[in-house]
Amino acid sequence: MSKPLECVTGAAWKGVRYFCTTRSGGVSSGALASLNLARHVRDDVANVDENRRRLAALLPTEPAWLEQVHGVQVFDADMPGDGGPCPRADAAVTTMPNRVLAIMTADCLPVVIGDVDGVALGVAHAGWRGLAAGVLENTLEQLRQKHSGASAWRAWIGPAIGQPHFEVGADVLQAFVQADPRCQEFFAPGGKEGKWLADLSGLASYRLRMAGVDDIQASGYCSYAQADLFYSYRRDASSGRMATVAWLERG
């Protein structure tokens, strides 16, 4: 008998439901066991479809999946679609009740952003490239355009690779520090010359605060260290993907 589908989430949020899946509760096997939700990782398509069906059973509508490219493009999920391929974007926003937003991760940051009253909502996929290039700021700007009267903003940073396991080169350090020298505090010396340990969650929290988000919660889960719960591309080259989903409940 397969394990039940397990999820992790954060504090209660007025008008908002959100969670990140774990790797438990699906039908994929081997290195992709068991709830792999990605179709681009050489999993059996039938397995992925069944895993997505199990996820959809927890949701009010089918998720708006994205083709993620480690960029900064934000998809407006409220715009009429033509039923074509998934939009190429690394974030999505909505003000429509029960419009489920979704991103997939396996070490990168999944970030849920919205106003405190549950009127406008967004999700973003932030690896170091997207984070340095401004994907979170772009998402927040789109949300502000959709809800200019928001009284305050909050965010949840989901499971991602932790600093002790995320060794990067000087190019990653410079991508952040050249834009803002204060980002240096989120890098510790690595085990080799010219290597650094980057705190992605800390960098995201800092950039969100600088952009005007006052209430920020980090999940505290490390995708690399907790192999029983999460996929990790850094740990396992043949890795599945978790999904972070979020939607508005009002109405």
Image (cartoon, rainbow, N blue to C red):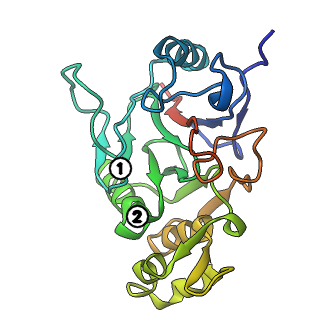
> Which-is-in-front pick, marks 2 and 1?
2
Mark 2 residue element: helix
Name the residue that disc number 1 marks.
147
Left-right relation of 227 to 46: right
Counting residues from the N terminus, which is met first, the one under dot 2 or under dot 1?
2
Q: Residue at x 50, y 33 (%)?
A: 248
Residue 117, compared with residue 195, is above or below; it is above
Q: Residues within 10 Å of mark 1 (few under 14, many from 20)?
A: some
Nearer-the-camera pick, 38 or 121: 38
- Quarter of the image for residue 244 reads top right
Return the x and y of residue 143 as percentages of the image width and height: 36, 51
Give the CA separation, mark 2 to mark 1. 27 Å
Where is residue 230? Give x, y as percent: 69, 41
In terms of secondary structure, where does tag 1 sit? loop
| Three-letter code for the amino acid on which mark 1 is drawn | His
Residue indicated by mark 2: 129
Q: Is residue 182 above or below residue 74?
A: below
Q: Position of residue 193 (x, y in %)?
A: 60, 87
Can you tell which quarter of the image residue 31 is in?
Answer: top right
Residue at horizontal 73 percent and vertical 52 percent from the top? 221
